[in-house]
Amino acid sequence: MRRFFLLVSAILLISCGEETLPKPKGYLSLEYPNKTYKKLNLNKPYTFQITEITKSKNLPKNWMKVEYPALKASVDITYRPIEGNLRELLIESERLVFEHAIKADQITAPVEYANPNKKVYGSLYQILGNAASQVQFHATDSSKHFLKGSLFFYTKPNYDSILPAVEYIKNDMIHMMETLEWKE
């Protein structure tokens, strides 16, 4: 019994020598490649530039996906011809943005875009919080073409974790709008 007491005492004396410190906070270090753009090469009534790291997926009805495999995300592009229904298309586009209000912390005021030389007019919305889509835009020439883009991640949304990727792709979506051209 005496040996046991000496052994326990020795362990206690040796183990109390250093002060225990908590581990420092870890920070997520994400590095995104520099952007190099290429012109979309699909047979659609529109074209714009996408980054080299993306893959374009052709879909029926002149729809498509711009996929970000490394980020597990995509920008889903829907196209609708205008047939006297511009007002309805604009209302539907806005309704689709505000469907995310249930999960969103905030939906920013739309950032308006206009390029009269290319006949491209549109708006971009950012949806803050754990919504299914964090950025959406629409663009039109007001007479023939209507395009909508929505950002989606292939994971359950956790806005704090995906915020850097949202900002990275949001800038690409703005570039899509800025380089958008209609094919006549």
Image: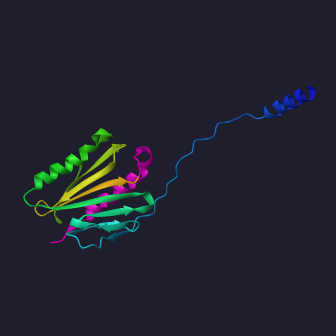
Magenta residue check for 2: no
Measuring 15% from the left and 54% from the top, which residue is drawn there?
89
x%, y% of residue 67? Answer: 37, 62
* Residue lying farthest to the right in this orientation: 2
Q: Is residue 109 visible?
A: no
Quadrant occupied by the C terminus: bottom left
x%, y% of residue 158? Answer: 42, 45
Indicate left or right for 8 with 47 as reference: right
| Image vertical order of residue 163 relative to residue 106, above or below | below
Magenta residue check for 164: yes
Q: Is residue 11 visible?
A: yes
| Image vertical order of residue 26 relative to residue 165, above or below | above
x%, y% of residue 81? Answer: 14, 63
* Residue lying farthest to the front in this orientation: 1
| Image vertical order of residue 146 relative to residue 183, above or below | above
* Viewer-side residue, 168 vs 57: 57
Quadrant occupied by the N terminus: top right
Within the image, what quadrant is residue 66 found in? Answer: bottom left
Measuring 45% from the left and 47% from the top, which residue is drawn there?
161
Measuring 45% from the left and 61% from the top, which residue is drawn there?
70
Measuring 25% from the left and 64% from the top, which residue is drawn there?
63
Total numbered circles: 0
Magenta span: helix, strand or loop, mainly? helix
* Viewer-side residue, 24 vs 13: 13
Within the image, what quadrant is residue 64 found in? Answer: bottom left
x%, y% of residue 112? Answer: 22, 52
Indicate left or right for 83 with 108 as reference: left
**Magenta segment boundaries in residue numbering:** 155-184
